Amino acid sequence: MKTHTRVAVIGGGVVGCSVLYHLTKAGWTDVVLIERDQLTSGSTWHAAGGFHTLNGDPNVAKLQGYTIGLYDELERITGQSCGLHRSGGLLLADTPERMQWLKMAHARARYLGLETSLLTPSEAKQLLPLIEDKYFVGAMLDAADGNLDPYGTTHAYAKAAKMAGAEIYLKTPVTALSRRPNGSWDVLTTEGTINAEHVVNAGGLWAREVGRMVGIELPVLAMEHMYLVTDDMPEVMEFNRERGHELPHAIDFEAEIYMRQERNGIVLGTYERACKPWSPKTTPWDFGAELLEPDLDRIAPSLEIGYQHFPAMARAGIRRVVNGPFTFSPDGNPLVGPVQGLPGFWCACAVMAGFSQGGGVGLALSQWMVTGDPGFDVWAMDVARYGAWATRSYTNEKVRENYSRRFSIRFPNEELPAARPQQTTALYDILLAAGAVMGDSWGLETPLWFAPPGVEPKDVVSFQRSNDFPHVKAECLGVRSAVGVTEIANFAKYEISGPGAEAFLSRLMTNRMPKIGRLVLTPMLNPAGKLIGDFTIARSAPERFLMWGSSQAQIYHMRWFETQQPTDGSVRLHRFDMGLVGLSIAGPRSRELLARLTDEDVSAAAFRFMDHRAMDVANCPALVNRVTYTGDLGYEIWVAPEYQRRLYEQIRTAGKDLGLIHFGMRALLSLRLEKNFPTWYRELRPIYGPFEAGLDRFVDLSKSDFIGRDAALAEKASGGTLRRVSFAVDALDADVLGDEPIWFDGKVVGWVTSGGYGHCVGRSLAQGYVPAGLAGNLGEGVFEIEIIGDRRKASILSEPLFDPAGARMRM
Ligand SMILES: Cc1cc2nc3c(=O)[nH]c(=O)nc-3n(C[C@H](O)[C@H](O)[C@H](O)COP(=O)(O)OP(=O)(O)OC[C@H]3O[C@@H](n4cnc5c(N)ncnc54)[C@H](O)[C@@H]3O)c2cc1C
């Protein structure tokens, strides 16, 4: 074994081998893989080997597409067969809602460049005669589906990596990891110690244990998973004989089963409701080649429905049952990337679909290590999306929920119940009593909308406009006509202080830093000039800045700030988390309301738009920003959590005769759409540049230096390739949700990032990206947006429908 390497990948499953291969492909060849036993000896060896492109997140779907396309390359390079069967797959819809869901998936596949088609039940039966078509209302065919040999594929990755210079050490368990003062890692194994500049945790079933070696508890849990292999089936053999090819794969959502051909029989796997975690606290080190005891009773409800839908399978004998564990994160997507606070320690774990996702994970991680950026939008699988709230028991509840719902529809307005409430503010009970319907905002309960007296505070899940529609409308109108109050604890809040604070922020952000008592809005770019953040920054003292951003990206942002922080102690970074909570009051009467709660002069002249002040509000020491995301006159009032109840009660009392109403996140998002305001995670993501996103006025190119400036200059000069635009949509009873294709002249030219109904302007609205050259087409209805299979006319809005001059914010 070497004594030093650039990268030590821990784990020789399909994911570790893919990471190793991709590192060599990216030009790093002094890399090693360390495996406890043999390659594939974790969950990889007993996988069913299926692959598909379908994923709830389009960016992950793209990486799945990359993975599936990679296997031919691997076979070509190595001569090692991956045992590929590119048979295509059917997704079978049993209800109209499921068909709507498939129509949306099909629409999204169009802009992802994936090959799918919608079928009637009889067309589906033509392709897969095993189905009893009376149980289905339709289907989608995904041409990219197939299956492979897990052992051959893993060895193909490993061989390709070795051919490029990587080394693989088998029978070498890693027992400990320790950090040297120079930042490198000593990887202690039973066969000696190797010093590595970077360590990758690809420990699969043991990823938690490898995490614990560096003091972290990763949100990952293994679940038992069963599939049956039937005896030879005459129906399968006859099909093969007649058609000259294999049966396509199928997913039957109602039965919660997937199936595919295996030799002359069928493999049938289930994602059963009565699912079972495996080894919830620790994975035994001696687990390996054995399988778990099958438990057919647990999957009997799925089999019962499946056997009705596929009668031939009910007649077939069962040759073997496989029950093996594999890992999941709380939302089912992988945990990938560098771990905040542990430079040089990377994750490539919780990959539940190693043969659909392993290649994409390897590609993204290797680019991230070699160039400092994954090269894609990998937010949906970034390890930084979880915080301290994702504890082991939280993970257990969420993983079980996710597993048991793997084949269930998630409606756009559906909040999942497991492990809730996890984090609450001091207002939780009060807001519930006021009729709040709560949503889970990255672990924090956040009011979505308020049910008036007599109305049940509950969402009716739907793809169409739902029961919240009139109530959200009332909230929007209440804000625009008088004043509303909403909780805004779910922001990220930071303090950046010290003699180097201004220079540090100025280098990170595209905008100039504010004067004392003022606010600025500013994007943050990566070196390639893409958007990696969007913040509001206040200066409260010469060397003290307060900053607000997106709560879900707190760890992601801290990780970036820490890599840029000077080592001389001149800049201190502090994340408030729930140590600073807030209420926003917005609407034309919000100034009157604030004035009743403070003896400071808050007149328009004394407390201007984009001002920031420390002042007593309702006796509470508060920080007040004169800004609101509603695009109206408004204020954000930030206090320590122990003051939040008092502040809220006083606002309620003082606002009574001003027409004060509650409003929730859904009203806030509707109000911001009327102003064409973008939002982080939807419109603002690391695949867009600042000019493409229309953030021109927040990018100060006259500043001599900031990260991404050269790329931003080039983008400005070229005009960029895309342009964020806002649309009014001729919708019927369903609004845009996000990820729908945008059509122009009979072709899909772009995609929607978010949308909804603008209640105060009375229009259905959407935002999205189109090629820059098309953004000037302002004609009425010249674009179309596909909403649940219907192409609806859409017109670009050249200015916001509400208050285009921005007078209300400045009044
Ligand atoms: C029954 C079943 C069916 C499945 N079907 C499919 C399917 O059809 N399609 C699909 O895509 N996926 C399927 N999967 C999931 C698939 O198996 C996983 O996504 C994949 O195996 C994950 O690979 P991995 O490399 O992350 O983890 P693992 O395969 O668990 O590999 C981790 C490796 O790390 C090694 N290791 C851990 N700790 C150490 C240490 N300290 N020192 C040295 N080595 C260490 C282990 O020995 C192991 O070899 C299935 C899984 C099961 C159980």
Image (cartoon, grey):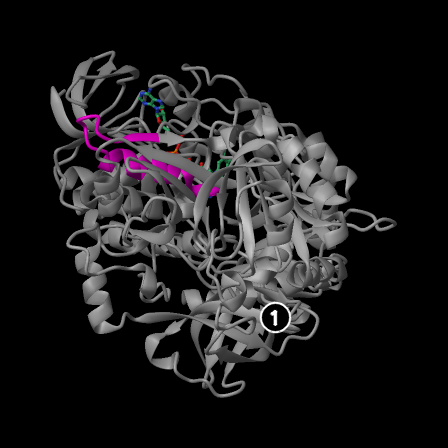
Residue 14's image quarter? top left
Q: Image point 45% across, 52% down: which residue?
A: 681
- Does residue 285 sit above or below 353 in this rendering? above
Q: Quadrant of ligand 1?
A: top left
Q: Image point 38% across, 81% down: which residue?
A: 774
- In the image, residue 593 lies at what x, y percent? 65, 49
- In the image, residue 113 lies at what x, y percent? 41, 67
- Does residue 48 sit above or below 460 in this rendering? above
Q: Which residue is mark 1?
A: 119
Query: Which quarter of the rendering shows the N terminus?
Result: top left
Q: Residues within 10 Å of mark 1 (few under 14, many from 20)?
A: some
- In the image, residue 748 lies at what x, y percent? 45, 76
Pick the residue in front: 1 or 186.
Answer: 186
Disc 1 residue type?
Leu
Under 8 Å from ligand 1: the CB of mark 1?
no
The magenta segment is 549-573
Classify residue 658 as left or right of residue 372. Answer: right
- Does residue 31 sit above or below 471 in this rendering? above
- In the image, residue 424 lies at what x, y percent? 62, 31
Extreme-bottom residue of the structure: 779
Q: Is residue 564 magenta?
A: yes
Is residue 354 something that shows in the picture?
A: yes
Pick the residue in front: 148 or 509.
Answer: 509
Pick the residue in front: 349 or 373.
Answer: 373
Pick the residue in front: 283 or 498.
Answer: 498
Q: Is residue 690 magenta?
A: no
Residue 446's image quarter? top right
Q: Image point 34% across, 55% down: which residue?
A: 66
